Image (cartoon, grey):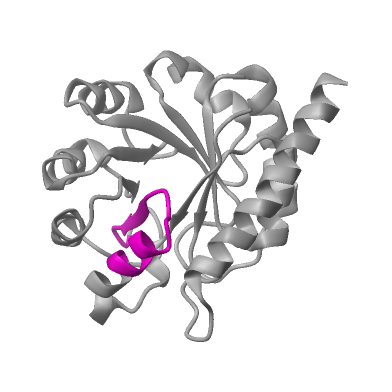
Amino acid sequence: MRDIKILPSLLAADMGRLEEACRQAEAASADGLHIDIMDGHFVPNLSMGPDVVRLARRTTKLPLSVHLMVSRPDWLADAFLQAGADTLLIHVEARCDPAPVLQEIRRQGVRAGLTLNPETPAAAVLPYRELLDEVLCMTVHPGFGGQVFLDEVLPKIRALRETLPGMVLSVDGGLNDETAARAAEAGADVFLVGSWLFTPEGDMSARLQKMRTCLQVALARGRSEREG
């Protein structure tokens, strides 16, 4: 069975207390941290830059997954590689050829990932499959946190799992214990979770454990259905 990984997304954290959020995730036994970078062009929002990645790198030993929601990752990728990303995800819809960027990411010893917006078909990643360590399926339209999970993305996750059985498949957007379980059953194994984990009243450790238990059951069920 594939490993389940849950990464809290710093986009949902208190921006004035990012170091505390990093330590909270580490104490809760998260599998890493996810950092969303937005340029105000590719998506209608602005977020963090390389300094936030450097801060996270200084604060925690958790692996850092950095998602570039930017029009020109070819211009920006190196800054985030130098800042300490362990995984760098770019969009197939960006305004450049993904292949050279993915090659450079790997050349620097960092995991390379390609992200698909909800409306982008699974086939869009296939020309780049040999350059990829991970495929990220957005389960909301990118740009803002706290959105509702899009069930219409589930068939794409199933198609990717069937076509790329050994690929790490991650999902991002609208995830809670129930929606993440649906994605796990479809074939996802990495879950980038924001608002559901960073809640004032919630214990992140307890929520992580609850989600992990739900995901293990769902992943086994999905595997059984595919093999049966």
Tell me if I can see residue 116 in this picture: yes
Describe residue 206's horizontal placement relative to residue 14 as left or right.
Answer: right
x and y, in percent, of residue 65 in the image: 34, 46
x and y, in percent, of residue 67 in the image: 35, 48
Tell me if I can see residue 153 in this picture: no
Q: How many numbered marks, from 0 up?
A: 0
Q: For residue 109, what is the image quadrant?
A: top left
Which residue corresponds to the image point at 56% horizontal and 41% vertical from the top-left?
4
Above or below: residue 88 compared with residue 101: below
Describe residue 22's horizontal placement relative to residue 186 as left or right.
Answer: left
Q: For residue 18, what is the image quadrant?
A: bottom left
Front-most of residues 220 and 39: 220
Above or below: residue 182 compared with residue 158: below
x and y, in percent, of residue 210 in the image: 64, 61
Front-most of residues 85 and 94: 85
Above or below: residue 22 compared with residue 152: below
Quarter of the image where the N terminus is located? top right
What range is drawn magenta here?
22-40
Describe residue 139's horizontal placement relative to residue 198 as left or right.
Answer: right
x and y, in percent, of residue 214 in the image: 70, 53
Q: Is 198 within the magenta? A: no
Which residue corresponds to the image point at 61% horizontal and 29% vertical from the top-left?
122
Which residue corresponds to the image point at 51% horizontal and 25% vertical from the top-left?
125
Quarter of the image where the C terminus is located? top right
